[in-house]
Amino acid sequence: MRGAVIPADRKPTEGVKILLGDPRKAIVRLSIPMVVAMSFQTLYNLADAIWVSGRGPDSLSAVGFTFPFFFLAMALANGISIGGGAAISRRIGAADPAGAGRVATHSVVCSVAAGVLTSAVLLLALPGALAYMGAAGEALRLSVLYSRILVSGLPLLFFNATAVAILRGEGDAKRAMAAMAAGGLANILLDPVFIYSLDMGVAGAAVATVLSMFVSSALGFYWLFVQKKTYVGFRFRGFRFDWGILRDIGRVGLPASVAQMSMSLMAFLVTTIIAKVGGTTGVAVYTSGWRIVSIATLPMLGVASAVTAVTGAAFGASEYGKVRSAYVYALKAGVAVELVLAAIMVAFAPQITWIFTWSEESGALVPELVTFLRVLWIILPTTPFGMLSSGLFQGTGKGVFALSATLIRTIVFTVPFAWLLGVHCGWGLQGVWIGMAAAAVAYIPVVFGWALLYLRRLQSSA
């Protein structure tokens, strides 16, 4: 027996009907729930930073120093889930529900195993790595404490990412949204209880985050394995790995993981550069400011997931015109949305910074944080070009294309520009911010031109 055996006459769900319908309507109907879902996912760490800021710069820096490692784990989890979700969408487009079920089964097995392994490795490596990054004294002690609790919950994170991707891959964006929203809400409510009421400080933030992961995972488990009202089905009894399915998941999932790891590497390198020119205070500014930028780019995460699902289904059905239509429509809408958000971020930068500087201990960060936002607003309208092009490549099975596009942005552009202006030219923190902004602009013609060329070749091959 290899994976799941699904009846060929399985009836399509409402989500599958949306996925296979008008691509522009599908982008809208799948994007909106996923934008909400991605917002709550980001609240896992955002809520920690907001509440922990009341404990002073050392506690806030502990969250910042840990972020690259947590991001690394998320990269692995999301890689498996993206690869599995894209493969499921392609099989749905090709009218192969049995194949979609086998992919889903493999995705769950791989994600749980990877979550356990990643947790074990990070628990061993964290103290030395945090010290190498520049954490010292009380900041190092708090960073180790926070990170060890957080990575202990990684198996839950991996399973939840895959469960959400399976739902999203078959067009069920509403339940995917509900699972992620429930976890984010739980984290918001539990953070003040554990950090302040129970006086656990930064350790309490980590405990609250792990419990919120459990809430999301429990919902996903119920829908997939107890309620069983999904288009795909599962069978684990007698399970054996099918290398063909693993290759199909891996050709998108592995590059997606490496791509997101490169973002973790970028965060690691940029944090190291910032620690060199701005110390612990600079790291706190970067951590807080980047979270604000991340919130503003959240809509693109939701739209990109919709682009992957819709283009994957259209590609599986050999409807290449739909592939182009979905990508172009999503890109136009994405740029418009991010321009509006950029204007809001610039106009209300002082008010926005209050979220992370409401305590007396964190008040000194305000001037640098305002400068950060008013320089890096340009990242917002440039983000759709990268994210949505990667979504297109992943949906159509071109994982290496998506990886290459990400590496160009993170390693070839962002890190060198930040180092050149911040360290080499001696411009300090402001030089780092300007370098990151310049890299975002320089990246647009590379990735957009590549996506258009790929679509032209795809349609000419039909």
Image (cartoon, grey):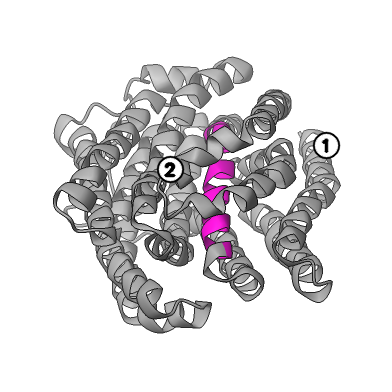
Classify 10 Å Cα crowding around label 1: few (below 14), some (14-19), many (20 and above).
few
* Residue visible at 37% across and 59% down in the picture: 242
Q: Is residue 296 magenta?
A: yes
The three-letter amino acid code for the residue at tag 2 is Trp
The three-letter amino acid code for the residue at tag 1 is Arg
- Report whether residue 169 is seen: no
In screen coordinates, is 395 left or right of 232?
right
Quadrant where the N terminus is found in the figure? bottom left
Which mark is drawn over residue 456? 1
**Mark 1 or mark 2: whose residue is earlier in sequence:** 2
Tell me whether the residue at label 1 lies in contact with that at label 2, contact meaning CB atoms closer than 8 angstroms. no
Quadrant where the C terminus is found in the figure? top right
Q: Is residue 124 above or below residue 312?
A: below
Which mark is drawn over residue 358? 2
**Real-space Cα separation, disc 1 to disc 2, in angstroms:** 51 Å
The span picked out in magenta is 282-305
* Residue visible at 84% across and 51% down in the picture: 442
The secondary structure that dominates the magenta segment is helix
Quadrant of the image occupied by residue 66: bottom left
Q: Secondary structure at mark 2?
A: loop
Residue 309: where, in percent of width, then height? 52, 34
Foreground tag (1 vs 2): 2
Residue at the extreme front: 360
Which mark is drawn over residue 157? none
In screen coordinates, is 191 left or right of 288?
left
